[in-house]
Every structure is written in structure tokens, then in C-alpha cells.
Amino acid sequence: MPEVLKAPLVVEFPFTRSLGPVQSAFLTGLRERVVLGVKTRDGRTLVPPVEYDPVTSEEIGELVEVGSTGTVTTWAWNHEPRRGQPLDTPFAWVLVKLDGADTGLLHALDAPDPDSVHTGMRVRVRWAEERSGAITDIACFEPYDGESAELTGSDGRFEDMVTGIVAPARLDYTYSPGRAQSGYINALSDRRAVGERCPSCRKVYVPPRGACPTCGVATSEQVEVGPRGTLTTYCIVNIKAKNLDIEVPYVYGHIALDGADLALHGRIGGIPYDQVRMGLRVEPVWTDGGRFPDHYRPTGEPDADYDTYKELV
């Protein structure tokens, strides 16, 4: 049995969103060291503010300032902070009901140990030295035994309002492709494409998953396919990827390798993007040291008849 592979994998992208008037005022207020909530029709003050009442679904927008001091309503100790969290030393996650608010704001509390944290303790905002109009403008909360913070009298109107934010999303994990895909990846290192055949329906799946998605039975019989194949469908990419050194426009498509009953995806090269078509016969192009085909190029054969690949589109 081949060694099952595993490797660290990172999936990340920047999520960009625009802000409505309520969120815009809230984040701009944080930049100015002001905490704003929104008042509902029945008199509750929600912090952080939302555009719609979570109870009645009514649209709300009456902004009201609340204090930068408050009371811990519940908490949990974080003994091992992760990358990107507010503090790099152990801290408490807390829900803080700020003075004048009726809901809790989730953030970090800088405390020496869990014994120093308790429900009902008084805390205050520790503002970040550099602020840009984001929740991180609150660096964290810190224990506080003084008087309630005085309000600034803000009405939620500021100069140079924050109108949008970019929130980076990232997921780090260890990926293991399992027995079937490990065999597929190992074969690619020899520039071969290997799938697995279902013992029931006899379909060959590339890349293999270890089981037939149609019959639900395990697969183990390896079958070498390709290397040539047929382009079944494709798209023209016009947006350049941040970490991909490929000029746009380029073509990305589904390729049914000869002998396979499942199309895999790959980039199409060696042909102008506006001449790519369904049924185009292609073959892999490898680069020195590459562990998988860099792209697929036309073979020069006549296009495949649609009936030969219509079930794989």
C-alpha cells in the first residue's frame, strides 16, 4: 500500500464589503474613540449596532452613544492565543455590556490569569494607538474599578466616514488526500494519470476518491488513463489571481482524459483563448520538476464528436 500523504494547506482570501449608514457610523466612531449603539423602537440599545431589530425585524437607525466602560456578563479563558487574535499572551474572551447598552460586545480582556476574571467585573476599552475604522480599533478590554466613562456627546456624524472594510479570511489545516488520491498524486510524479474503476458500474474515476459516487462501493482497481483527453467545457478567466503568474485572459476547462469517466480541470494553453472550443483534443504539458501538468495544449487531432463526451459535460 502506498504511503498516505499529508501536507499543510492554507486557504485565504480578502473579503471586501461595503457598509450601510449604521455600520459606517459605528466603525468611524471607533476610529474617533467613540462607541455607538442603535436604539430600537421599544427602547433597547444594541451594541454592536445592526440595521434591523433582531426581534421584530424592523429597520432601525437611531444612533446613540454608549460608554467605553462596562460589565462582563460571561467569559472564557483562552490559554493559547492563535495568529491574528487580539493578544499574543493568554487572555479571556468576554461579553461586555457597555454602560448604556442592553446587549453584549464580544472582545478580548487582558487579564493575568483566569482567577482574575469573573462575571460582573468592571472593565474599560483599551484603544489601539493607531486606528483606521475597524473593530480592532478596540485593542482589548482591561480591568477597571473607576467611575463610568463620560460620553463625548457624539451624534454619529463624523468627517471622512468609513464606507467599506476588507476582512481577510484564512483557514490553516493539514490535508490528507487518503489512500486513493495519494496513489493518484504519486503516479503524477511519474507523469502518469491513474484512476480507480468501480467494481459494479465499471466507471473509471480520475482523480479517484476511494469509492464510486454512483454505486457507493469501494474502489481499488487502478487504471491508467490518458495522457490525452477531450475538453468538455471551459471558461475564459479575465481576472488576474494575486498569487498566480498567468496573464489574462486565459482558459480553464474540464478535461475528460481518454479512458476516464470523470472530467478533471486544468488550464488550456498553446492556442488563442478565442479559438478554444468544446471537443478540442488536448494533451498535458509538463515543466521541469513539476508534480502535475502545467497546462494542456491542442494535439492537432480532429475535434471529438459531442456524443463521445456529452455525459461528461
Image: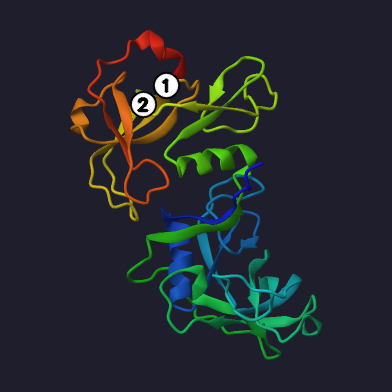
Viewer-proximal residue among 76 and 22: 76
Q: Which residue is mark 2?
A: 228
The N terminus appears in which quarter of the rendering?
top right
Q: Amino acid under label 2?
A: Arg
Residue depicted at 51% across the width and 72% down the height: 136
Residue depicted at 46% across the width and 33% down the height: 193
- Relative to 157, say whether 153 is above or below: below
Q: Does residue 83 appear left or right of residue 241 in this picture?
A: right
Q: SS at mark 2?
A: loop
Q: Distance of mark 2 from mark 1, alpha carbons?
A: 6 Å
Q: Quadrant of residue 138?
A: bottom right
User: Do callouts 2 and 1 mark residues in contact (Cβ within 8 Å)?
Assistant: yes
Residue depicted at 60% across the width and 16% down the height: 202
Q: Amino acid under label 1?
A: Asp
Q: Label 1 crowding class (10 Å Cα cut-off): few <14, some 14-19, many 20+? A: some
Q: Label 2 crowding class (10 Å Cα cut-off): few <14, some 14-19, many 20+? A: some
Q: Quadrant of residue 82?
A: bottom right
Viewer-proximal residue among 226 and 116: 226
Q: Which residue is mark 1?
A: 258
The C terminus appears in which quarter of the rendering?
top left
